[in-house]
Image (tube, coloured by chain):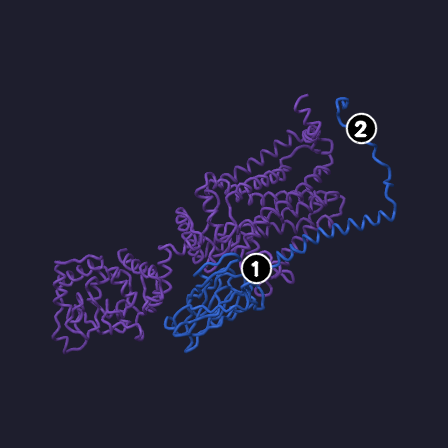
Amino acid sequence: MQNDLGGEPPRAERPEEPSRVDGSRRGALKVLVALGGAAYAGAIVVPAVTMLAPSSEGGAGAARWMRVCRLAELTEGEPRRVVVVGDERDAYTVTKDQLLGSIWVTKKGESVTALSAVCPHLGCSIDLNGDKKSFSCPCHTSKFSLAGAAEAGPSPRGMDPLVVRVVDGHVEVDFKLFRQGIAERKEVG
Amino acid sequence: MKLGDWLDERTGYRAISRKFVEATVPGGARFAYAWGAALGIVLLLEAVTGVLLMTVYSPSATTAWASVAYLQQKVPGGWIVRGLHQFGAQAAIVLAVIHVGYAIARGAYRKPRELTYWLSLAMVGLVVVTALTGNPLRWDQRGFWGLRVETGIIGTVPVVGGVLQQLLLGGGTPGHMTLSRLYTLHTVVLPFLLGAIAAKHLWLSRKHGPALATPADAVKSDRYFPTQAARDVIVAVAVLGVIGALTWMRHGAPLDAPADPTSDYPARPEWYFLALYEMRKPFPGKLELIATVVIPGLVAGYLVLLPLLDKKADRGVMKRLPLLAPVGLFGVAAGVLTFASMRTDAADAEFGKAVAKAEAQGTKALALAQEGVPPEGALAMLRNHPETRRVALFEQHCASCHRMGDLGPPKDKDTAPDLTGFGTKAWAKRVMEEPDHDAMFGKTAFKGEMPSMTKPPADPEAAKAFTAMAPADLDAIADFLAVQAQGKKGEGLPGEKLVSQRCTSCHRFDGKTDDEDSLAPELRGWASVPWILAQIDDPGSGATYPKGAMDPKLEGHMPAFKDKLSEKDRALLAKFVQEQAGK
């Protein structure tokens, strides 16, 4: 290495055992490093957890009565698939008149019952069987009675019932989505 | 001073490249060692194509599908990059499994290579997880429903499942946040993890060298470059050939219709998960966790523990057979289950129909996207397009009573006239011949109101006085009505005179009728678009039927849609009914 033209000066030999710092000062510096490190870690981890933790904003508790069909359109005892149309809120956008989901409504005399068409197993879309005597899910062959009770297959619970009311000859439903794959019926936003 | 010297003084690159060139392969170069290298090269391909995709892709529920369709259709070479990326990902899974499988067969997991082996297992897992987070990004039906099911399975895992599922989805249901999170995982978190593990794995495998097949191999040795490097490149290029061929054949990668949470889609996992999919079938209800968590956990656990179980001095395959047998069994079982799953679906006609429907929807969506996707997103584009929307409108508002072609209630469940061919000569003729047929007015309140022109009435007294209409006259009237339905006046046609002579005793014609109390509809402009529209708007308005005949308040009559549907939707329906008649 030629250093005579203003190159790098030779470096000091690597010191032996570091001895510039005595015991107590060494301990204090260790604490300092740990505290500084913790400050940084905390400054990142705390907001990160806060930010990433799922929120249920706009979810549970909100009234979501939706008009889905006319009572007169229903055939006695025969489930009919109707779509639920409403404003869809997804994080930062709201879209008017979106298809929010589909449900099965059945008229029994004067009363109407509604079942979510979302399979409680893993969320596929439940179909009415050809003989109109039961429901089934095409994905994992869960079978349900017309009343929505789980009869066969992997579904951990029956179809999710929705609250219905009839207003001026129109069927209205309190539209909700539920968590899938668990025996409990838990609403999601 | 030369540039090379200048650079070497500052970086020491010559020593590094010499180390690479002069590296040796103890035991000699082999094609069998090339799988790992080919995997490394494919992962590089994934990184490069991935960065290119990032320049076009836009992760939100309204833009994701549209940006991928744009990439596929409009961006020059976009489909090639996308195809290489998608099929490269599948190739990476195959290569990772071959690489680890070979290591297990050779006993390359034994001391001192346990860590090298464990890192390779972690890489297989990460490669699969990266593929899984990549699939839903295109936000098409397949990706979306796959995600729903996968996160659903995650949600069933005891204790952590629920939180993990919500973390992945970024809330309760899949949407914008889901895409942002999957995108972050797929493009930043997982690639960095994978890269770091791959680097450590490579470093360790260099340190220990290949596990020699026989003691005799110890005397052999090759230079890595070019002896082994050539083998690596040959395998890697062959793999690239397969990836390229698949890309060419599929014109990029498949893209279904935009994700639609309200649709019924025949959801199936990607081929590399079919075995797991098939496996859960015999485990109903609560037992499903056995298939989704317990068995995969046990298999993974066995593979992880393998180096600790295998302590014999001999590394020969025969000597390790009892330990290797379960691994072979996993492989065979995976193959059999995958095959069984494919065969079940291939034999299922219903499933085939659903797949064909989904494919048709995808083709239509891509055709629409050619004209650009509105800011509301691809799903809104598909739903609001007249072609799709009018079918949906008919299904939603008309099909509970009327049948029309494939649409409508099953036979015998319809309560209103069959609109198939409504406005054609055949329809007009039929209603004159057998008005009380179930497909005509037989199931409506008008049953018995209109006499047949060709068949004598049931009442014997009236039958005596009955004379059937001459076939030529019947034809002329039907011809005239069919012309009306086309929206033409048809003035001067022989049928016009016949109608005014023979039909106006009950029917209105230009608003005039002999019997003001009759319930029969207006025949001028019958079944034309304005006539149908007036009927949809309000059957009780008097424009189509006399005011008292079709009051929507009357039991069993057609409702008025004026306040229920927008003007645009009503016009769409009227045109649809009229157009379908001509088919």
Q: Is residue A183 above or below residue B361?
A: below
Residue A76: percent from the left, percent from the top? 39, 74
How many residues crowd around disc 2 within 10 Å: few (fewer than 14), some, or many (20 or more)? few
Three-letter code for the amino acid on which mark 2 is drawn = Pro
Mark 1 belongs to chain: B
Amino acid type assigned to the residue bearing label 1 in the image: Gly
Please identify the residue farthest to the front as the structure is shown: A6
Q: Position of residue B479 (x, y in %)?
A: 17, 59
Give the chain ID for the blue colour.
A
Q: Report whether residue B135 is seen.
A: yes
Q: Give the spatial CA distance, label 1 vs label 2.
A: 61 Å
Expressed as whole percent of the image width and height from the top left, the position of residue B573 reads: 32, 60
Chain letter of mark 2 equals A
Which residue matches tag 2?
A10
Q: Residues within 10 Å of mark 1 (few under 14, many from 20)?
A: many
Q: Nearer the viewer, residue B313 or B361?
A: B361
User: Which residue position holds label 1?
Assistant: B171
Residue B237: image tag: none
Q: With B381 as the anchor, is B554 left or right in this view?
A: left
Residue drawn at (65%, 53%) of the image: B299
Q: Which chain comes out purple in the rendered image?
A: B
Indicate the quadrant containing the C terminus of chain B: top left, top right, bottom left or bottom right. Answer: bottom left
